[in-house]
């Protein structure tokens, strides 16, 4: 069985994006549970996680990570346009 891994990224542009947390095992499972509880979009991407394992927390993200994140965000945004929204 593969150990669970998780990472958290904060920032709105390539210049401001930072790795704010990363974990494996039970702590990663807790990070994911909190993300789901707060309705944060979560994506499984082993290639991105491999890149993020080499990044120190608080550090800017490398260009190759930003390329993967941009693709993920494009898909999340496209999906949100398709999903029905509840009226407030």
Image (cartoon, rainbow, N blue to C red):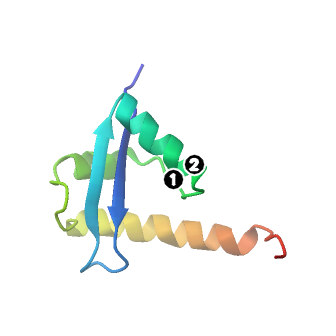
Tag 1 secondary structure: loop
User: Residue 77 bears which disc, if any?
Assistant: none
Tag 2 secondary structure: helix
> 18 or 53: which is nearer to us?
18
Q: How many marks?
A: 2
34 left or right of 66 in image = right
Please rate how many residues cluster around mark 1, counting C-alpha atoms within 10 Å: few if below 14, some from 14 to 19, many from 20.
Answer: some
Q: Position of residue 20 (x, y in %)?
A: 28, 58
Q: Is residue 31 above or below residue 67?
A: above
86 left or right of 72 in image = right
Q: Earlier in the sequence, mark 1 or mark 2?
A: 2
Q: Is residue 69 above or below residue 56?
A: below
Residues at marks 1 and 2 touching, judged by CB atoms closer than 8 Å: yes
Identity of the residue drawn at 44% across and 35% down: 29
Q: Position of residue 19 (x, y in %)?
A: 26, 60
Please rate how many residues cluster around mark 2, counting C-alpha atoms within 10 Å: few if below 14, some from 14 to 19, many from 20.
Answer: few
**What residue would you read off at disc 2?**
36
Could you tell me which quadrant the C terminus lies in?
A: bottom right
Could you tell me which quadrant the N terminus lies in?
A: top left
Identity of the residue drawn at 22% across and 69% down: 63
Residue extending furthest toward the top: 1
61 left or right of 84 in image = left
User: Residue 42 bears which disc, if any?
Assistant: 1
Q: Is residue 62 above or below residue 13?
A: above
Identity of the residue drawn at 57% across and 48% down: 36
Q: Position of residue 33 (x, y in %)?
A: 52, 41
Identity of the residue drawn at 24% across and 80% down: 15
Closer to viewer: mark 1 or mark 2: 2
Q: Position of residue 66 (x, y in %)?
A: 31, 69
Spatial separation of the CA atoms under disc 1 and disc 2 = 8 Å
């Amino acid at each position: 069985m593969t150990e669970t891994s998780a990472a958290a990224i904060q920032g709105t542009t390539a210049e401001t994006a930072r790795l704010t947390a990363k974990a494996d095992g039970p702590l990663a499972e807790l990070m994911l549970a909190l993300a789901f509880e707060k309705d944060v979009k979560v994506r499984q991407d082993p290639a991105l996680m491999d890149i993020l394992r080499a990044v120190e927390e608080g550090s800017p993200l490398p260009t190759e990570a930003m390329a993967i994140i941009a693709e993920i965000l494009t898909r999340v945004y496209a999906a949100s346009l398709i999903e029905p929204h509840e009226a407030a």
